[in-house]
Amino acid sequence: MFALRHLLVALAQVLNLVLTMYMWLIIARALISWVNPDPYNPIVRFLYKVTEPVLAWVRQRLPLVYSGLDLSPLLVLLAIVFLKNFLIASLLDLAYRTC
């Protein structure tokens, strides 16, 4: 049983790290969108390549409430915070109850 507990704790920690890193990538993408970035810059291309699939998926399902205002980064950040507070806490709780 202790192996399952350690597996769940490790899974929760890795998931927390991945979600935190993706949250910072979304924030960087939102900040870069306020200026006119060079589309050939490798950092800008990396940010767009990593974040665009999720943001495009949210944009397709989100009607434009305000003209030209993209709320998809905000919704993705809220989803990440929810996952970090719910899923990771649930995994850790499950891990410590399997004693």
Image: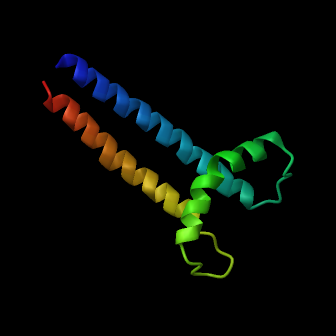
Q: Toward which corner of the image does residue 70 lie, by quadrant?
A: bottom right
Q: Toward which corner of the image does residue 63 lie, by quadrant?
A: bottom right
Q: Position of residue 96 (x, y in %)?
A: 18, 29
Judge from the rendering whether residue 92 lies leftward or rightward of residue 74; answer left or right: left
- Tell me if I can see residue 27 in this picture: no
State which quarter of the image contains the N terminus. Answer: top left
- Tell me if I can see residue 66 in this picture: yes
State which quarter of the image contains the C terminus. Answer: top left
Q: Residue at x 79, y 59 (%)?
A: 35
Of residues 62 and 36, which is closer to you in this image? 62
Q: Is residue 73 above or below residue 71?
A: above
State how the image is colored: rainbow
Q: Position of residue 81 (x, y in %)?
A: 42, 52
Q: Residue at x 38, y 31 (%)?
A: 13
Of residues 35 and 88, which is closer to you in this image? 88
Q: Position of residue 19 (x, y in %)?
A: 48, 42
